[in-house]
Amino acid sequence: MDIQQKGHGNFDVDLSSVNSGYIQPPDYYPPIFPDVAKYNWTLTTKTDHTIIINIVNFNLTSRVDGVCEDYLRFSSNLDGSEPTVEEYCGTIHPKYIHHHSRNLFIEFRNTRLRSNSGSSTFRLGYSLCA
């Protein structure tokens, strides 16, 4: 885990010896982020496994003028450089996300500048599928 400052962090999660767990912002409860929060998680597992995400709690700001101001993005490329596979905000999201890859990059951004950005938070469960 690498936290540079409050509201920013990069987390590497090696699933070689762990079968399940949770991903959530370090400031999960109470959910108080700085005006611009940036968190990234990189999950990697064995070559013969894939990653399943279970959305346990999801409370992000809804789209404003068609744009997600707070969002979660999922991609299979470890640096997030490929086109976004999936992006979610607001209250519409699947219960499960199954990436058919041994790598998963998760990006959380709170991009709206406002005085109290503490209303958005999430908690994701993860497990492996052989």
Image (cartoon, rainbow, N blue to C red):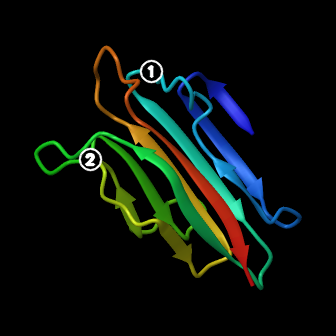
Where residue 78 sits, quadrant-wise, is: bottom right
Could you say whether the residue bearing mark 1 is in a helix, strand or loop? loop
Q: Earlier in the sequence, mark 1 or mark 2?
A: 1
Q: Residue at x 55, y 70 (%)?
A: 76
Mark 1 sits on what residue?
A: 34
Distance of mark 1 from mark 2, alpha carbons?
Answer: 17 Å
Q: Residue at x 56, y 32 (%)?
A: 28
Q: Position of residue 22 (x, y in %)?
A: 67, 50
Q: Residue at x 43, y 51 (%)?
A: 72
Label annotation for residue 68: 2
Q: Is residue 104 left or right of residue 97?
A: right
Q: Position of residue 68 (x, y in %)?
A: 26, 47
Q: Is residue 4 left or right of residue 83?
A: right
Three-letter code, disc 2: Cys
Q: Residue furthest left?
A: 65
- Residue 53 position (above or below residue 106): below
User: Split into 4 quadrants, where in the image is the N terminus?
Assistant: top right
Q: Position of residue 116 (x, y in %)?
A: 34, 17
- Decide which of 72, 21 is in the foreground and name it: 21
- Could you classify mark 2 by the number of other residues whose Cα lies within 10 Å: few (under 14), some (14-19), or many (20 or more)? many
- Does residue 84 show up? no
